[in-house]
Amino acid sequence: MTRRNLLYAQSGGVTAVINASAAAVIETARRHPERIGAVYGARHGILGVLAEDLVDTAALDAAALTSLALTPGGAFGSCRFDIDAPADNPAQYDRLFAVFAAHDIGYFLYNGGNGSMDTVAKLSQAARQRGYPLVCIGVPKTVDNDLEGTDCSPGFGSAAKYVATAMLETSLDLIAMSGRTGRIFVMEVMGRNAGWLAAATALAGEGEDEPPHLILLPEVPFVEEPFLERVRAVVDRLGYCTVTVSEGIRRPDGSLVMEQHHDARGHVQLGGAGQFIARLVHERLGYKHHWAIPDYLQRAAGHLVSATDLAQARAVGQAAVEFALGGRDAVMPAIRRDGDAPYRWSVDAVDVHAIANLERVVPAHFIRADGLHVTPAALDYLRPLVEGEVIRPYRNGLPYYPTPQLPALARKLPAQ
Amino acid sequence: MTRRNLLYAQSGGVTAVINASAAAVIETARRHPERIGAVYGARHGILGVLAEDLVDTAALDAAALTSLALTPGGAFGSCRFDIDAPADNPAQYDRLFAVFAAHDIGYFLYNGGNGSMDTVAKLSQAARQRGYPLVCIGVPKTVDNDLEGTDCSPGFGSAAKYVATAMLETSLDLIAMSGRTGRIFVMEVMGRNAGWLAAATALAGEGEDEPPHLILLPEVPFVEEPFLERVRAVVDRLGYCTVTVSEGIRRPDGSLVMEQHHDARGHVQLGGAGQFIARLVHERLGYKHHWAIPDYLQRAAGHLVSATDLAQARAVGQAAVEFALGGRDAVMPAIRRDGDAPYRWSVDAVDVHAIANLERVVPAHFIRADGLHVTPAALDYLRPLVEGEVIRPYRNGLPYYPTPQLPALARKLPAQ
């Protein structure tokens, strides 16, 4: 058997547990020295491959890998960059395969979401066309939980635990502060097209009168009047109302509720839906209003990861290496749900071509008939994903996140 | 010795540990059955006294008090309400003392900030004038850390731990996501006039190139150009920049940087300074921008309390009862710093008349000469306050916050 090097990279928005997948990839690869030589990383995803900006993971000992697995963010650096179709930009692929060849890369593992799976699919195809022996495997990751082909995505469970905890805790604050004038608290969570994280805040309460009282999902067109009527009804009953808002909620005409300026590359900069909703309620109903935007906090909270999510992030990292060694190509390890109560799961392989660029949104049977909350079926789905706490090291009162030592590899090619 | 009842109430913005003070008050009072009869609570602070809306704490057993101490928010309900001066509104005081007399209240403990200490001072004075035997004690609490007469305020250490952790974790996310275009992350924290929480985020990093790179305090007038120059310098060096913004930063003319509409009672509704700063940088320097507004999350995060803060919240609750029994009146237990390394502290009594309505801001020697960060002396002050983690119960993956059983007392007076 030939012995080739493995290249791992991270892509898309990072999560609290993506580095646990990285650690599992490295640990598993080291258990197969007969097949896998060095384990390298690319800085900032596929951009690091194009730039031949590679690092060596050899200096990470067992303790460093344990720390890495408990560190949020992407230790290798991430990117938001889609490679072109092979036919459109052969020079790009010439460069990618030159870098692969220069460092004897036989395995490429890309840790990302649906866009990254497209990169895996394209590279796999290009390798076959070029006759370059490269095994390409996707490693799933996204707080948005919008990957198709898997029951859930590593990263989601921890973000879900964070936003549900935030909703639970802030609601205790809101209840304490509420007097006779009526008070509303709005929390805006991530989710441009898929409302999974908004749905997860439902775990904070049980029953109609517990927070969050209303959940606005991007899957459901937002109409002001019925929403305001429901807010008023909740405040009339309780004196307060909590609302979760997905950043990407849209009006019936498809426009974003809080359309903001576009950035230089044409991307919509979101972040105003929560503020918009809070002010709408304040202006129309006169209630006191507060809003929170956790933003990066919800996907970076290493101090509050879900033990289930952490285990799954590790499992997909391990499976990715095992699939690569088992002759699979262009697949992604997926989480299968084998049982709800008790929750049981396993890892399976799905074809990246079948899932690349797809977005799995919250299905209709998880959304309450009035569109303003979720169903018991959604709670059954969500509950196990936030289960379990992880005891982690602290130093000087803060989580201890040592910087992993990842020395740069010497370049072998001219810069581009 | 006469045996009288004790009335406890909460006021102002609540914290992650105010209920620990409540639990300590109840536990300590129960150790003195010869002097203290029932321990009652007023709902929503002094408003609950005026409304004779009282509850009994007798049903809280040891386990319930342990849970209460680890539950954020204000279990008794809080309020933002200042009583009038006795001379201006004798009817208000007639009502307050009628309620005290109806329930044989001999001890009134008010858990709040500088406004609440003013209530304690006024009630103490009025009781003497009326010849009503009432001992009035303030119990300190505020995430803003702006109480005079104490080295720190219970509630602050936990909020400080939360915002410092948030800055640390989000910076790992930011670093991973940063490419060559420049990226800024802004976190807006609480603090209308005092920048203690903003200053506390400095604990996330060590040295100039670690987050947060810049801290905007309400104590320092905000001027755009020097700020933007510093942001540019940081991004030129690192590719990214993190900024902490106090909600209450002001321009040199005294106006709020993000002046928003006033609510019905004339209060300024803050919450836009972080967004303003992020957009300013984006528009002027072209960087990608994200901003977070933890809002209630920072003061309600029972899952991440500081063990030091929790211990101090308990200590001031205990001391308040002991001061009351020791013949003190119109005092507040204060935290004294007896040593920095190792940190040692004790509880002392301060006269509420000397501190009521004062606001302690971040002193000049804690602010870096350029006004855009804090000094090593500030870090020495802050470091011990976030120290220590608390192992707490979880259920179904979320912190377990059972609702304390606080049955209403039968009213003895006609409603007003």
Image: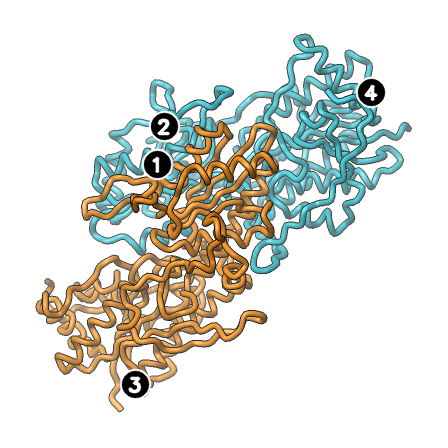
Chain colours: A cyan, B orange
CA–CA distance between discs 2 and 1? 9 Å
Residue under disc 4 on the same chain as residue under disc 1? yes
List the residue tagged with mark 3: B327
Q: Amino acid at mark 2?
A: Met
Report whether residue B410 is seen. Answer: yes
Does the residue at mark 3 contact the one at mark 1 (Cβ under 8 Å)? no
Identify the residue at horizontal 22%, vertical 69% (top origin).
B409
Q: Earlier in the sequence, mark 2 or mark 4?
A: 4
Does the residue at mark 2 contact the one at mark 1 (Cβ under 8 Å)? yes
Residue under disc 4 on the same chain as residue under disc 3? no
List the residue tagged with mark 1: A275
Provide the secondary structure element on which disc 4 rests. Answer: loop
Q: Earlier in the sequence, mark 2 or mark 1?
A: 2
CA–CA distance between discs 4 and 3? 85 Å
Q: Amino acid at mark 3?
A: Gly
Foreground tag (4 vs 3)? 3
The chain ID associated with circle 1 is A
